[in-house]
Image: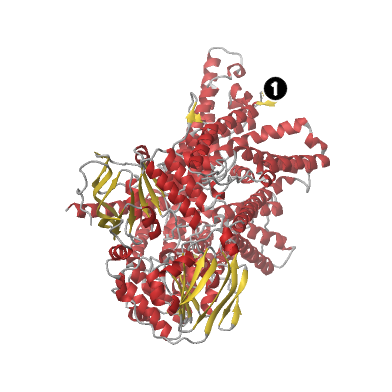
Amino acid sequence: MASVTGKIPAFLRRREWLLAALVLLVFFWFNAREPDNYTFFKLLNQTRVYMVDVGFMALGMLLVLILGDIDISVAATAALSATVMGVAYRGGQGLPFWLSILLMLLTGAACGLANGLLVIRFKELFPMIITLSTQTLYRGIAYIILKDQSAGGFPAWYAKDLGYGSLPLLGLDVPIMLLILLLIFPFYYLWLHRTAAGRRLFAAGTNITASRYSGLHTDRIKLTAFLLNGLFAAIGGFFLTSRTGSVKYTIGTGFEMQAIAVAVLGGASTSGGRGSVPGLLLALLLLTALKNGLMLLYNDAFILNLSVGLLLILVVLIPNLFSALADRRRVLRQRLQLAK
Amino acid sequence: MQEMGAHPAGDGLVLEITGVTKIFPGIRALDDVRFDLRRGEIHALIGENGAGKSTFIKVLTGVHQPDSGTILLNGQPVRMTDPLVARRLGIAAIYQHLAAYPHLSVAENIFMGNEQLSGPLQFINWPGTRRRAAALLKSLGSGIDPAAKMGELSVAQQQIVEIAKALSQDASVLIMDEPTAALSQTESEELYAIVRGLKEKGTSVILISHRFEDVYSLADRVTVLRDGRYIGTWDIQEADSALLVNHMVGRSIDQFFPQKTAPIGKELLRVDKLGRTGFFSEVSFSLRAGEILGLTGLVGAGRTEVVEAICGVTRPDSGSITLEGKEVRFTRPGEALGRGLALLPEDRQKQGLLLPWSIEDNVSLPTLEACKKHRLLSRPLISRLGSKAIEQLAIKARSGLDTAESLSGGNQQKVVLGKLLSSRARVMVMDEPTKGVDVGSKAAIYQIMCDLAAQGFGILMVSSEMPEVMAMCDRAVIMRQGRVSAILDRADFTPEGILRASMPVERKEAAGA
Amino acid sequence: MSKPPVKVFNPGRLLRNRELGLSLVLLALVGLIGLRNPAFASINNLQFILGDTAIMIVLALGMMCVLLVGSIDISISAVMALSAMTAGIVMKNNLSQAEAQALAEGAVSAAAVKVSTPLPLLLLLAAGVGAGCGLVNGLLISYGRVLPIVATLGSQYIIYGLSHLVSGGQAVYRKDMSEDFIQFTRGSFLGFNSKVWIMLAAFLVLLVFITYTRHGRRLYAVGSNAEAARLSGINVRAVTLSAHVIMGILAGLAGMLYASHDNKITQDMAMGYEMYVIAACVIGGVSVTGGSGKILGVALGALTIGVINNGLTMLRLTGNSEFWKKAIQGAVILVAIITNVYIQRGHERRVLRERRL
């Protein structure tokens, strides 16, 4: 497989077409079932609910997955960060809103930083178990702070303009938060696929030992990835809260799974060294279309999570099966050559 | 050279292997190999890295199934569909990278897969297991405690446990893969005695070893493999080491060492009493510009650990490193690289290259900052680095876009070199630069080393190959059991002298010497 | 050839014996908490803790098997829910059928007919469902080569979804349960709750399995050195699969215990319970990278968690201490795995120092 950056190799190009085709397929399938409710315009509006928060988390998760690591604590980080924001603001009685937002971002970064430090200091442990425990810890801290209550009372513009506001563009009502997300993509793409820093990330994920021997500061690369992941998670939580208007310690449950699914569907691999930003965007669209349709048809969070869980497993399982088959085919071919 | 069938027909042949081929995705590990083993003989199997020896063992022990060929055990054709079948047929192997369970006890390691059961419910009989283990160990002259955890034993002790394991399976064919690689002189002697004892009891042994002293001390016959193919079998008396090396390598070895004419300049690197607990201690030497300094000794002497500590891969616990007059302490290889100290690692695939990446991407990795235009990476600049490396080092590839994994061993090594050279190093540390490299590339690498020396580089070369050390180095540092035992000038190079300085000694000897 | 016996026995090792240390820590905890709140250390309360922890121990036994082979399973709480819910729905349906029939035949009240689906059958059903879930997890992980965390993260939500579907949106309450089932965890024998006896039975079975059977030892082998196990002819994939199936069966059983104890089966019951179980294993000395772990340690680890949990409630530190439990859980696991790392590093340093140089 040729290098990931610069020329996008044929393989990845194929995947993106496949994703685009799937998006259309899903759209038309649900549209047939619910022609009135499942339209492009309605979907666009619903991206608030189904796309933006997960989108940010997936962007962060991509960094960690490219490294070949995993971070289960993103949803908990989002919850904790949003909790800090809500409690700091205290419905207007506490700190000014901009400061509360700053604290939220700092919390997210701190959570990510903590994860990163643990991962690089304790290389004997896998990021899996580390982030599994920090997930419980972060949510636990949110629980301590907020208990069973919800923090709300945010400034009107937060919920109204950000959460539910749209900008008329090209005759469409595009949600503002969607615009913000989409605006990030081109910069993120450039950073990941076209800069030295992004290249180093891919290198560390492809072979961390060789990267280290080649002079890369692999500890710093890991730390940065986890920190940014925490930051993105916090931002995701920020947008999630803007449309619900309040925060509880339980928000975002299940989002870590969606973030991983989107990133992997978009081209990342749990073994590291791979990932694609355009692919992530398409995968995100696919997941959004899917979630939207499922909620319309069933209106059931359990079924939604069941489907996403299924998607996650299939997305990881199918490439494995294909490569096992390809290997077997290669060996058979060589054996046939031998027989001649 | 022996002809198959030139021995008394059918009598005394434990194993007769013909036409065995084994293919993996992309590589032909064994190609129409044949081999035979007489009852009660010790038959050495030698070849370079990648010659197919370890695949051969795995086929014999049922881990892999051959794609073609026949294996006759005592005249009967056998098909070993899995390791259990091989074990039941009496074939046992002791692997180079010990196949042991570090968390489990010695007794359990011996009997894993061959558990001693008792009672109506067929439970594991632990007292019985421990007793039998102790008896087996005693028969080998060892007092290792069967209840000890395997991971806490020394390598030599673990080896003995592995032999006990083979004994417990009543092996009639014992395969030993590099058994003395990490043993001291005394421990090797003890092992030889054990193996000879097994031979007397009628066990047939296939011995795989890089160490010719093993081969000449123990073997009755020797077979050479090269590139997965059978080259030939000789009686040990008929085969001198030059002949064997010739066949292993495929060519006479004297031909391709270039002349080294570089003038020696001032000191570039100095190491003073460098130590790392458990690996090496009191290591001191210096390297000058234009010099090629060899670092040799047996496997396990600590050479790679020393260079890793110098170049920042690991941290030394004591001593100092002085680079171009300034004392330095590196915490990671990147710092060393930045100061002009480059390391060509021992395992180029795991430590040197990003295999799925292209040549130019690999070569440009340390110097990405210099490949930027308007803050973004510039493909033309990267390509240029790649082409330069390909040209300078004569890398055989269609273009800089070829992936590293598609290249041969020698060309891969050149890519790693190209990567290091692109980062303006002044001191080059090379760990086994020609290991597993084909003959043509070896010559090229030697030439590159001489050219670098002529340009004023200082080169520290870790090598296990005597001819290489003697031909290329101005001086040689010989390590033994974690310490420097001798530093020889080129004028004083003799194979015996180097060997003697490499061979481990008894503790009390060293203290008195 | 004579050579002095190489005894690697170390008297210092006894002091470093983990189980001993844990027992001391447990005693210390009980003592300390008991000092602040004497009610905590009463026989009654201790028995209660034991009964409460019994479910966790049953699950931890299964988790140990999974961790031993180097895998993990975070879907166990979902498995508990699905197994209990399946059995519960069956029980509920049969019960209402039996009730209707009895009332038609002139029975006085429903209470008289509260015995219908035999308990053993329900338990078998739950175990079967659990085994099925474990089988799927195991297949994904060992044959599908899916990362264990990813496989069980996905299956967790899938299984909870199935639990939801099976439940039809309803819960199973006390009135829907057969008398047998309700009394299942209420009975006492020799002063100990029946849960404790069931846990003991599971404990003994697993103990024998893991210490005295070939298959049990293979769990250790696969986790300690999978490559060596493969070379020995051990079917690594099958062993990993079996560990997950064992976990599934025990999770099914635990689900029933939980449901009986709670007198309630909801579609999302036991959510988050898997972290307690993992914490118990990690404190008990099971390595998260596989290959080592003692069954006694696991039980002690679970007891420690049970004591901490109960102690927190009894101590009433900061208002209602319920809210601290989650964070403490996470912190405890972190501290335990980090401590394990330091112990391992210290050990390795010691081995390096002892090398002859």
Residue C2 position (above or below residue A116): above
Which residue is more in the foreground, A308 or B494? B494
**Relative to A138, is C320 on the left or the right?**
right
| B261 or A109, nearer to the observer | B261
How many numbered marks are there?
Answer: 1
Query: Which x, y percent locates residue B352?
Result: 43, 68
Look at the image and tell me whether residue C260 can be seen: yes
Q: Which residue is painted at 51% across and 21% down in the image?
A: C97
Q: Residues within 10 Å of mark 1 (few under 14, many from 20)?
A: few
Residue B36 location, x and y as percent? Answer: 27, 48
Q: How is the image coloured?
A: secondary structure
Mark 1 — on which chain does it sit?
C
Q: Nearer the viewer, residue B265 or B444?
A: B265
Helix, strand or loop at mark 1? loop
Which of the 4 image quadrants contains residue C355? bottom right
Report whether residue A172 is seen: no
- Residue under the point 58% across and 23% down: C178
Q: In the rendered image of this protein, does residue B51 appear above or below residue C43?
A: below
Does residue B405 sit above or below C276 in this rendering?
Answer: below
Q: Which residue is mark 1?
A: C190
User: Residue C99: percent from the left, percent from the top?
Assistant: 55, 19
Q: Is residue A105 left or right of residue A202?
A: right
Quadrant, the C terminus of chain C: bottom right
